[in-house]
Image: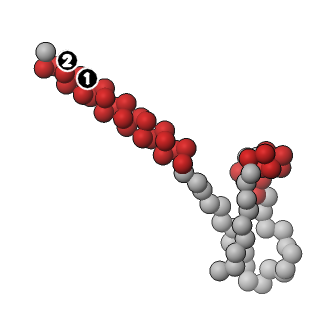
């Protein structure tokens, strides 16, 4: 009996861990950073963000992706 109860507890914990990891994975956002030398001319090509993310431009628009640029 005790072994069966321990097995149920382990299964419950495993299920809880699985659910937490799945939810966490759905909520995570990411960042892509591009380093640019100071001497680079204004308007120079830096990177293809859509290609780096593995999307085409239509998918980006459909998913409501925002690209935010800020100087540091």
* Quadrant in the rendering for residue 69: bottom right
Q: Residue furthest top?
A: 1
Residue designated by label 2: 4
Q: Residue furthest left?
A: 2
Q: Is residue 36 visible?
A: yes
Say which mark, if any, is on residue 53. none
Residue at x-position 62% and y-position 60%:
31
* Quadrant in the rendering for residue 44: bottom right
Secondary structure under tag 2 reads: helix
* Quadrant in the rendering for residue 6: top left
Secondary structure under tag 1 reads: helix
Residue 62 x, y percent position in the rendering = 78, 45
Q: Is residue 28 left or right of residue 69?
A: left
Q: What colouring style does the render use? A: secondary structure
Residue at x-position 25% and y-position 23%:
8
The number of discs equals 2
Cα–Cα span, label 1 and label 2 = 6 Å
Depth check: give the residue in front, 26 or 48: 26
At label 1, counting other C-alpha atoms closer than 10 Å, the crowd grade (few under 14, some 14-19, many 20 or more) is few
Residue 67 x, y percent position in the rendering = 74, 62
Q: Is residue 51 visible?
A: no
**CB-based contact (under 8 Å), mark 1 and mark 2:** yes
Depth check: give the residue in front, 23 or 33: 23
Residue designated by label 1: 8
Give above or below for 22 relative to 60: above
Residue at x-position 65% and y-position 80%:
72
At label 2, counting other C-alpha atoms closer than 10 Å, the crowd grade (few under 14, some 14-19, many 20 or more) is few
């Amino acid at each position: 009996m005790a072994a069966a109860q321990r097995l149920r507890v382990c299964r419950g914990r495993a299920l809880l861990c699985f659910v937490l990891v799945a939810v966490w994975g759905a909520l995570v956002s990411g960042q892509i950073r591009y380093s640019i030398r100071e001497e680079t001319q204004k308007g120079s090509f830096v990177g293809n963000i859509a290609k780096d993310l593995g999307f085409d431009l239509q998918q980006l628009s459909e998913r409501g992706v925002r690209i935010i640029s800020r100087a540091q």
